[in-house]
Image (cartoon, rainbow, N blue to C red):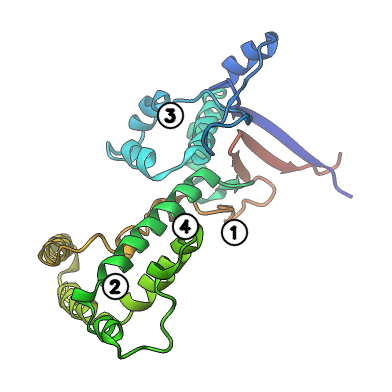
Amino acid sequence: MTPTRIGVFGWGLVAPGARDIDAFASMMLGQDSQLSRFDGFGPSNFLVGNPSFDFAAWRPWIDARFPPNRYPLLERKFGDPAKFAIASFIQALGQNAAMEDELRALGPAAQVIVGGGLTDLPTYDRLGRTLWRVQRRWNRFWAQPERNAALRRHLAGTLDAAAPVDPRGVEDELARDDAEDAWWSYWAARSDALAEYLAALREIEGVDVGEDVDTAKASVIKAKQRGARELRVRWGAPEAPWEQAMAPALWNIASTPSSSKLSRKKADSRRIAASASSAVLINRAQSSSR
């Protein structure tokens, strides 16, 4: 079996109590605990190791290499684990001044591999709860009798046998929440006012960009957004759930191995491996005779 040589040219980390390698080294010389209270479930006795981290500390590096809007985009779209990986990668590059130029020269032969681990659970939890609240408000709005002829008929005595239980008759508070969700969802789907709203929205969204896509697309997108806002204001409607299916859910997608099959230069392919806690530059070369 041919032995494999692995060269580690740089590494970085973000750890509990440490924003970078130097802080981690200092921390390891001390005896202080890096556990702190976790309040994600409200007041509790849970202790966790929170990284001492400020993504803004890495902004100068990013601003020097990318357009001005790149850092604000990363700050807004990414959750902490992705930011930890970026910071770790920057640290790794900083340990070998020639590595950055070498990676640029390699072009498509440089490969980024991301190990997701448990992924960004806090971000997904926050997005999920936000979407749930938005969906609940949306359904409740369209499930009101004044916007729903089918519900008015039901309440007037022409009963819909398939309708769920009216939550007003549910005494248990926890069960009432579930009953409200089922009730609002059912009647929102039958709202004649919502059907009218969606028909108007289709007209707004149906505007064609035309043949000159590059020139017209920005103005058309803005016109659609403006039309959708004005429509919502006219109806007094809340934000639609599809407007809150936020980009961070895609930017922080679970298990994001960017391990696309890239071209290799025979026995001299390079890879960048970056995880949520560390980044290592790896040069893999096959040893011929050893």
Closest to the camera, between mark 3 and mark 4, is 4
> Which amino acid type is shown beneath numbered disc 3?
Phe
Q: Which mark is residue 143?
A: 2
Closest to the camera, between mark 4 and mark 2, is 4
Q: Residue at x 53, y 26 (%)?
A: 91
> Which amino acid type is shown beneath numbered disc 2?
Ala
Closest to the camera, between mark 4 and mark 1, is 4
Q: Residue at x 57, y 15 (%)?
A: 23
Q: Which mark is residue 55?
A: 3
Residue 99 in view here: no
Work out whether residue 142 or residue 128 is closer to the camera in this orientation and state it: 142
Secondary element type, mark 4: helix
Q: Residue at x 31, y 66 (%)?
A: 140
Q: CA distance from mark 3 to mark 4?
A: 42 Å
- Residue 18 location in percent, x, y? 57, 20
Q: Which mark is residue 173?
A: 4
Q: CA distance from mark 4 to mark 1?
A: 53 Å
- Residue 174 location in percent, x, y? 50, 58
Q: CA distance from mark 4 to mark 2?
A: 20 Å
